[in-house]
Image: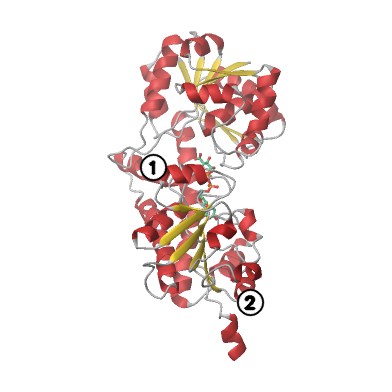
Amino acid sequence: MRLTVIGTGYLGATHAACMAELGHEVIGVDVDADKIAALSSGRIPFHEPGLEKLLGKHLASGRLRFTTSYEEAAAFGQVHFVCVGTPQSYRSDAADVRYVDAAFAELARHAAPDAILVGKSTVPVGTARRLADAHAVEVAWNPEFLREGFAVQDTLRPDRLVFGVESERAGALLREVYALVLAAGTPLVSVDFPTAELVKTAANAFLATKISFINAMAEVCEAAGGDIGKLAEAIGHDDRIGAKFLRAGVGFGGGCLPKDIRAFAHRAEELGVSLGFLREVDAINMRRRDRVVELTRELCGGSVMGARVSVLGAAFKPDSDDIRDSPALNVAARLQLDGADVTVHDPVAMDNARKAFPLLGYALSAEEAIRGADAVLHLTEWAQYGELDPVRLTGLARTPRLVDGRGTLDGARWTAAGWDFRAPGRPAHPHAAVIKER
Ligand code: UGA
C-alpha cells in the first residue's frame, strides 16, 4: 500500500520506518525542513534503539522517503497517518490540538476523495468526531501505545491494535495496513471514535496511577519503617496486580504520562465527570521529587548549600535522550537553586540537558561526576549505573553518600563498601562502621 505519515517526531519517524518494514511504500512529511533533511540522510534527531538501522534499510530499499510537501504526500498516499504532537497548553491542563487540526485541514484540502485520514496522536475524546464533521474525508482513529526505548518492537509487535472506525471500508483498509501484525496473532479491538480515543488516555492514566500507587505506599513505608521494594515484590506476585510498573522512586516524567493525565482530567471535567483521583496521582508523583531533594538535604546534614552533588541520569528514563519533564533534571535544578554545586552525567541525554539547563555542571563519565561529590543521586536507571563498583568509587567521592531515586541499586553492597545509602521508601541501611560497632 502507499501510506503517508504526517509528523516525523518520535512517533511519526518510528511509524514511517515500521510501515516500510511491513512492506508498504511510505512518505514521511514534516514542516521542519532540517528534520526532513536529517531523516532523508538516514539520521534520526533523537535516541531510539534500532530505529536508525531500520530507517537506513528502507531509505536504501526505496520504500521510504521524506518531504516537506503536503501536496506531494497527499497525491501519493491512500492512507494518511497523522502523528503530530499534542503538548500541554500554556494556559491550562488541556491538550493543545492545533497541530492535529492543521494536519487534518492540510490533508483534507489536498487528499484524493477516497483517501482515509487516520489519527494516531493522543487527543481529547471528541476530536475524531469533530474532525470528521469538519472535513469531507473519511476519518479513523488508531491510537499508539509505544514506549520510548522500545518504539520499534512496540510498533511491529504491539500488545494490541485499536481501530476507531465508522465504516467497513476504513476497517478493511486498516486491516490491510497491519496485515502482517495481525497475522502474527496481535489482538484487534474495533471500536467507535470516542472509545478509541479513550483507550489511549485510559491506558496512560492507569499506568500513571499504578506508579503513583506504589509511590504512595513508599510514603507509608517511610512513615512506618517498611520496605517498598519488598512490598512491591510481594504484591506483584498476585497475577491480578502484576509486577510491572511497580518501581517506586522519583516518579514518572516524560512527554506523555504527566501531560496525558492532566489533559484527561481536564477533558473529563469538561464532560461533567470528575477524575479527581488523577489530580492526586499527579500530586503524589510531584511529591516524590520533593522527597528526593529532602533526602539529599538530610544526608548533607540539613542543607545542600555549597555541597557538591552528582546526579546520575538526565533522561526521563533509560534508553532515551528525552528530557521532557525529567524528574532527574527537575531535582538537579532544585538542588542547584538551594545552593548546591550540581554535576550531571547521562550516557545519551547530555546535549539535550545542556540546552535546557545550561547552568548545571556536566561530566563526561559517571566517575568524573562522582569525583569530589558530597552526595551522589541515582535518578535514571541506566544499566551502566547498575554496574558501577561501589568499592572503587568510595575513594572518589569526598563523602560517600548515595540516594537511589530509582530503587534499583543493591543497597547492601553500597553500604558494605562504606556508602551512606538511602532510597525513598526503604529503610536506611546501617552504615558498615555502625554494624561493626555492634
Ligand atoms: C508511555 C506509555 O508507557 C506508552 O504505552 C505510551 O504509548 C506512551 O507513554 C505515549 O503515550 O506515547 P513512555 O512515556 O515512553 O511511554 O514511558 P514509560 O515507560 O511509560 O515510563 C514513563 C515514566 O514512568 C518514566 O519516567 C519511568 O521512569 C517511570 N516509571 C515507570 C516509574 O517511575 N516506575 C515504573 O515502575 C515504571
Label 2 to label 1: alpha-carbon separation: 46 Å
Residue 85 visible in the shown view:
yes
Judge the density around disc 2: few (<14), some (14-19), many (≥20) Cα neighbours within 10 Å. Answer: some
Question: Disc 2 beta carbon < 8 A from ligand 1?
Answer: no
Residue that appears at 64% across and 32% down: 52
Quadrant holding the C terminus? bottom right
Colour treatment of the image: secondary structure
The secondary structure type at the circle numbered 2 is: helix
Give the mark nearest the N terminus, 2 or 1: 1
Judge the density around disc 1: few (<14), some (14-19), many (≥20) Cα neighbours within 10 Å. Answer: many
Residue 228 image point, x, y percent = 53, 68
* Residue 96 versus residue 231 in the image, above or below: above
Residue 257 image point, x, y percent = 46, 46
Q: Quadrant of residue 185?
A: top right
Residue 264 badge: 1
Residue 334 image point, x, y percent = 37, 58
Q: In front here: 264 or 289?
A: 289
Residue that appears at 36% across and 39% down: 88
Tell me which amino acid carries mark 2. Ala
Tell me which amino acid carries mark 1. Phe
Q: How many marks?
A: 2
* Residue 337 versus residue 190 in the image, above or below: below
Residue that appears at 61% across and 67% down: 393
Q: Residue furthest left?
A: 91
Residue 416 badge: 2
